Image: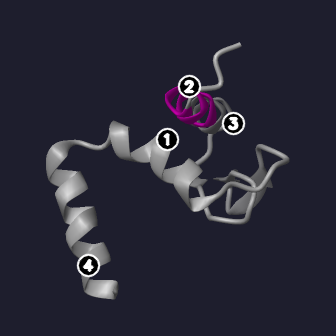
Amino acid sequence: MDNSPAVRLRLWLLKLAADGGSDLLLVPDAAPAIRVEGRLHAIGDAPLTGPEIEAAVLPALAPHALEIGRASWRERV
């Protein structure tokens, strides 16, 4: 099975939609999770690293969203 970052993101989003969730939470050093009816549910076992999250999410962002994210990051460092 393809376990590329894009496929992982798609699977997380499909799980979010199938479960009627409202939020996908991708936090370094934590397993991916979704919020369903106000409660958090882990949707994976392994904690994610920051680079794993970036590899999955950044390619999916529109160019203007990517630039906003980069600007926000620059303000924090």
Mark 4 and mark 2: span between their CA atoms?
Answer: 28 Å
- For marks 2 and 1 on the same chain, the one whose residue lies earlier in the sequence: 2
Residue to which mark 2 is pinned: 7
Query: Which mark, by number, is residue 56?
Result: 1
Q: Secondary structure at mark 1?
A: helix
Q: CA distance from mark 4 to mark 3?
A: 35 Å
Badge 4 amino acid:
Arg
Looking at the image, tell me whether mark 4 or mark 3 is earlier in sequence order. Answer: 3
Q: Amino acid at mark 3?
A: Asp
Identify the residue under disc 3: 19
Q: Secondary structure at mark 2?
A: helix
Q: Quadrant of residue 26?
A: bottom right
Q: Nearer the viewer, residue 45 or 55?
A: 55
The stretch in magenta equals 5-12
The type of residue carrying mark 2 is Val
How far apart marks 2 and 3 lie (CA) works out to: 18 Å
- Of the pair 17 and 49, the residue shown nearer to us: 49
Label 1 vs 3, first from the N-terminus: 3
N-terminal of the pair, mark 2 or mark 3, is 2
Residue at the image point whose x is 26% and y is 78% from the top = 74
Q: Is residue 45 visible?
A: yes
Q: Residue at point 57% right, 27% down?
A: 4
Residue 9 colored magenta?
yes
- Foreground of the two, 76 or 15: 76
Tell me where residue 15 appears, x and y as whole percent.
66, 33
According to the picture, the residue beneath numbered tag 4 turns out to be 74
Q: Position of residue 10 (x, y in %)?
A: 54, 29
Q: Are marks 2 and 1 in contact (CB under 8 Å)?
A: no
Residue 16 spot, x, y in % from top left = 62, 39
Q: Which residue is at 60% across, 57% downward? A: 25
Question: Relative to residue 2, is residue 13 depicted above or below?
Answer: below
For the residues labelled 4 and 3, say whether their Cβ atoms are less than 8 Å apart.
no
